[in-house]
Image: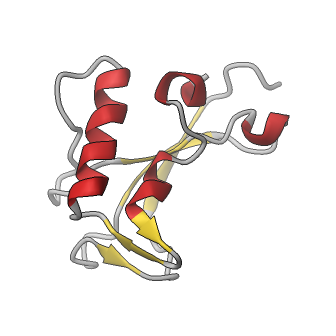
Amino acid sequence: MLKDITGSGWSSGQCCNGGSCDFTAQNCIDRMTTVATSLGFSEILMDPWGYPYMFDENEMEGGNCGGKDRIWVVDPNSGGIRDNNWTDYNMSIPFYLCP
């Protein structure tokens, strides 16, 4: 499962502090680089607007089949900063273990 590979149930959450997220911050870039290399890529994966792709590893998070893993991009009009307005674009990854 993705969370077992990346070591997190919400890697992109490390880019956030409270309700605000800065996807241009160095700690965010570092974490997404770690995720990309753990998935076998040689460098960070960037979206067409120059922000790192974000990962939300949900399958079996908390020990249940409540949600799918997701990869998402930051709203291109956000400047890489986001508050509680989650208007991003995302893609679900098919389940690995869950039915």
Q: Residue at x 67, y 20 (%)?
A: 96
- Left/right placement of residue 63 relative to residue 16 reads right
Residue 57, position in %: x, y? 58, 40
Residue 65 visible in rendering: no
The answer to whether 56 appears left or right of 63 in the picture is left
Q: Closer to the camera, 43 or 87?
A: 43
- Residue 17 location in percent, x, y? 46, 72
Q: Position of residue 54 (x, y in %)?
A: 39, 50
- Classify residue 86 as left or right of residue 28: right
Up-down relation of residue 47 to residue 62 (above or below): below
When asked about the image quadrant of residue 93, the answer is top right
* The C terminus sits in image quarter: top right
Residue 49 appears in the rendering: yes
In the foreground, 83 or 28: 28
Classify residue 76 by image quadrant. Answer: bottom left
Query: Image quarter for residue 88?
Result: bottom left
Tell me which residue sits at (28%, 78%) in the image. 78
Query: In the image, is residue 63 above or below residue 38?
Result: below
Residue 95 appears at what percent x and percent y? Answer: 68, 27
Report the number of discs.
Answer: 0
**In the image, residue 22 above or below residue 90:** below
